[in-house]
Image (tube, rainbow, N blue to C red):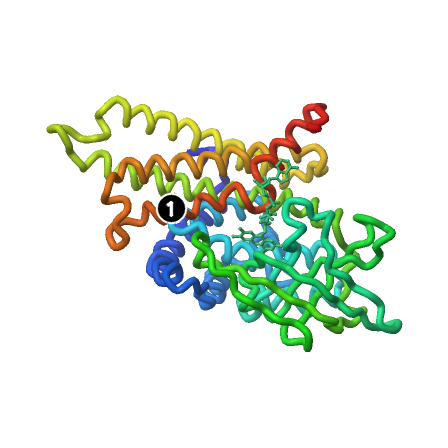
């Protein structure tokens, strides 16, 4: 599907990524899920395979490709497990991209290559207990402590791979009076005095666990401050939404294939359960939704690669993210329903896990309501 518009190199990327997912993700995801531990060796394995830093500059060890190639990679990983996929794209793209887009040359050279090689983990610490969807409400403070040092204090939560990170990109308020313009990112060493990490135990997304971060007067040198804050992260969220749409596109396809396999082999009342009209029609609806997600996601990636200004691609990006996450929830619940009692047997089938994981889909990088607000505003409505 859609392959007619992919060039031979992109087709090759899909093959390499699919093979990597089969070889490295498939045998690891169950244990990662049970233990709620990310298998860190995946990062260097992906690097050796040429799958880290797909869109990162070649001068930093990346491949210098585009969002379309990142989408291909993410989709293939997520067809096997959406959570290990997100760990890989967080380290290969989302977190270091803040550095290669907004950091100084020195900061980029020091911090990006080790992350792309899988040697160091870089967390992205934006969310706080009282600043979830509303990032403008970040309360973590950075106050000057002499000309060359800052002191950071506050609390972050839901920080993916936070427990493994050597550095965290922490969004903090440098100037209360300046509102959203008074925020900056800092590259913070997680072993600095005053920095504490506590794992969050969650029902979903277990292979890419999240943490709370507590900062109490953590000293950070001026050289670790980025000239980027609220506005830059809002722009970056658009790229993240494209990759998140690809993540849930892969997940929906996995749930669909699983359900199709089951519905065409399981028989009741003397026939395949997939041949009952009420079940067959669910597959028809799911197929249409997945195809629509595929088009929206790849189109959004193409718009990004064409270099359209953010204001001209926001609506399409949010549409892809919204439909992809809605579809992932629906299709994985459909699969669970079709699995009957067997869908809930832990050792037998991964389908209950798929349905639970899909509850995360709408939450990250803007919920359903946040995406609808963006779309409605781009349509000229006020959404009050
Ligand atoms: C698995 C996972 C991984 C994450 N990883 C990271 C990470 O690495 N780094 C990081 O910084 N953050 C991370 N997050 C945080 C994530 O970005 C937030 O969870 C998200 O921004 C939503 O915030 P919240 O959970 O506090 O929900 P809230 O913002 O409190 O939202 C609760 C509900 O209210 C609704 N709502 C909010 N505002 C409006 C509105 N204006 N209109 C209508 N409804 C509204 C929402 O849609 C939602 O349904 C992660 C979260 C999860 C679950």
Instruction: Report the residue at 71% width, 70% height from top.
Output: 216
Residue at the far front: name it.
130
Task: Look at the image and tell me whether residue 150 can be seen.
Answer: yes
Ligand 1 under 8 Å from disc 1 Cβ = no
Q: Secondary structure at mark 1?
A: helix
Residue at the far top: name it.
277
In the image, residue 75 sits, relative to residue 320, either above or below, namely below
In the image, residue 193 sits, relative to residue 266, either above or below, namely below
x, y percentage for residue 119? 55, 71
The residue identified by callout 1 is 354
Residue sitting nearer the eye, 370 or 320: 370
x, y percentage for residue 230? 74, 50
Instruction: Report the residue at 38% width, 43% height from top.
Output: 355
Residue sitting nearer the eye, 258 or 154: 154
x, y percentage for residue 219? 75, 73
Task: Look at the image and tell me whether residue 72 can be seen.
Answer: no
In the image, residue 275 sits, relative to residue 158, either above or below, namely above
Q: Is residue 266 left or right of residue 139?
A: left
Instruction: Report the residue at 64% width, 68% height from top.
Output: 167
Quadrant of the snapshot with the N terminus = top left
Q: Residues within 10 Å of mark 1 (few under 14, many from 20)?
A: many
Residue sitting nearer the eye, 287 or 201: 201
Instruction: Report the residue at 50% width, 53% height from top.
Output: 86
x, y percentage for residue 88? 50, 57
Q: Is residue 360 left or right of residue 169?
A: left
Residue sitting nearer the eye, 105 or 296: 296
């Amino acid at each position: 599907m859609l392959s007619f518009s992919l060039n031979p190199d992109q087709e090759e990327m899909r093959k390499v990524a699919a093979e990597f997912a089969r070889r490295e993700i498939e045998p690891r995801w169950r244990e990662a899920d049970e233990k709620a531990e990310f298998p860190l060796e995946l990062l260097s394995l992906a690097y050796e395979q040429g799958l880290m830093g797909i869109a990162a500059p070649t001068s930093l060890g990346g491949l210098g490709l585009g969002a379309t190639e990142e989408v291909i990679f993410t989709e293939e990983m997520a067809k096997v497990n959406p959570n290990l996929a997100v760990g890989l794209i967080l380290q290969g793209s989302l977190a270091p991209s803040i550095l290669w887009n907004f950091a100084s040359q020195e900061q980029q050279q020091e911090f990006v290559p080790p992350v792309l090689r899988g040697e160091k983990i870089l967390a992205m610490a934006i969310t706080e207990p009282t600043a979830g969807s509303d990032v403008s409400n970040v309360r973590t403070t950075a106050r000057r402590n002499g000309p060359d040092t800052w002191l950071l204090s506050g609390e972050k939560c839901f920080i993916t791979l936070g427990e493994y990170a050597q550095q965290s990109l922490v969004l903090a308020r440098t100037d209360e009076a300046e509102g959203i313009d008074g925020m900056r990112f800092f590259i913070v060493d997680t072993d600095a005095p005053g920095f504490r990490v506590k794992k969050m135990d969650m029902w979903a997304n277990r292979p890419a666990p999240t943490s709370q971060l507590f900062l109490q007067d953590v000293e950070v040198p001026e050289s670790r401050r980025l000239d980027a804050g609220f506005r830059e992260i809002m722009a970056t969220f658009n790229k993240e939404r494209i990759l998140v749409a690809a993540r849930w596109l892969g997940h929906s396809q996995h749930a669909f294939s699983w359900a199709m396999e089951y519905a065409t082999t399981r028989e009741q009342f003397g026939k395949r359960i997939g041949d009952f009209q009420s079940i067959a029609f669910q597959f028809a609806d799911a197929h249409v939704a997945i195809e629509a997600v595929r088009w929206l996601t790849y189109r959004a990636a193409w718009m990004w690669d064409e270099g359209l200004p953010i204001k001209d691609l926001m609506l399409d990006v949010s549409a892809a993210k919204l439909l992809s996450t809605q579809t992932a929830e629906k299709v994985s619940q459909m699969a669970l329903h079709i699995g009957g009692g067997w869908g809930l047997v832990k050792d037998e089938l991964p389908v209950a896990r798929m349905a639970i994981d899909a509850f995360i889909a709408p939450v990250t990088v803007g919920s359903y309501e946040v995406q609808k607000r963006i779309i409605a505003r781009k349509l000229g409505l006020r959404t009050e």
